[in-house]
Image (cartoon, rainbow, N blue to C red):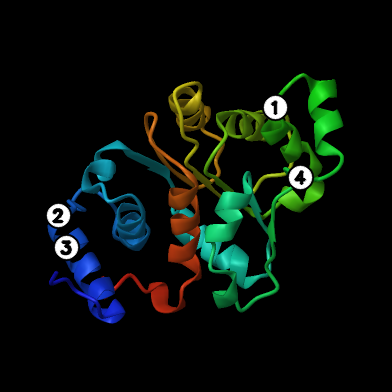
Amino acid sequence: MGYLKNPDEIYAESFAAIRRETDLARLPAELHTTVLRLVHACGMPDLVDDLAWSGDAPSAARDAIGQGAAIFVDAQMVEAGIMTSKITSKTEVLCTLRDPATPELARTLKTTRSAAALDLWGAQLAGAIVAIGNAPTALFRLIELIEGGGPRPAAIFAFPVGFVGAAESKQALIEAELGVPFMTVKGRRGGSALASAALNSVILPGNDDGGAQ
């Protein structure tokens, strides 16, 4: 079989194809790098049709990471996909889903472990970056915490996935008007790969997206 084997060539051709097939015309230039990485992660150029955002989440996240702010994620799969070796600041990626306190807290709050885990973020949420790539209940809880006067993150990348609550949680974020920069994709689509890809677009040196800039 004849197929492309050189990893650098594969990488370059991938982003060349993405740029040919993805319509970025309606998007602000500051979002292009992140959007290209999202498309690269899922193989769906039409993702841009469902993209929603407020403010400049990539720049806000980049500034926060530069100051060593934490990155909070809802699932270990999101954490595993983040290129932490490229982070040059003191920023840590934190996931409290498996914290020993989470199961009991979920029972007390009568909610999912994914949602209860957010209550352990505490004051560290202020100025941090949040990436949700799995649980709609985590996004709903984040909105509740912020609307209730809790700490405000610097940026939110919201990509919960599924058939129950995913579309609704992202629509709730859009309608909440929290005043926090965010990026999300409407509907059921989402996932850990998208959440980590969004973070990687901010972390990688020079916003490397295979020659997009």
Q: Residue at x 68, y 63 (%)?
A: 69
Lower sequence index among marks 1 and 3: 3
Q: Please, what secondary structure does the residue beneath circle 4 have?
A: loop
Label 3 sits on a secondary structure element that is helix
- The quadrant the C terminus occupies is bottom left
Asked which quadrant contains residue 2, the reply is bottom left
Q: Residues within 10 Å of mark 3 (few under 14, many from 20)?
A: few
Residue designated by label 1: 112
Residue at mark 2: 21
Q: Does residue 130 appear anywhere in the picture?
A: no
Relative height, residue 80 to residue 145 (above, below): below
Q: Earlier in the sequence, mark 1 or mark 2?
A: 2
Cα–Cα gap, marks 1 and 2: 39 Å
- Amino acid on which the number 1 mark rests in the picture: Thr
Which badge, 1 or 4, is on the more N-terminal residue? 4
- The residue identified by callout 4 is 98
Task: Please name the amino acid that badge 4 sits on.
Answer: Arg
Cα separation between marks 1 and 3: 40 Å
Q: Residue at x 76, y 45 (%)?
A: 98
Q: Amino acid at mark 3?
A: Ala
Discs 1, 4 touching: Cβ within 8 Å: no
Whether label 2 touches label 3, CB < 8 Å = yes
Circle 2: residue type: Glu
Question: Residue at horizontal 67%, vertical 68%?
Answer: 91
Q: CA gap, disc 3 to disc 4?
A: 39 Å
Residue displayed at 62% across by 32% down: 143
Of callouts 3 and 4, the N-terminal one: 3
Please, what secondary structure does the residue beneath circle 1 have? loop
Name the spot of residue 68 as percent of width and height, x first: 68, 69
Residue named by callout 3: 17
Label 1 vs label 4: CA separation?
12 Å
Distance from Cα at disc 2 to Cα at disc 4 = 40 Å
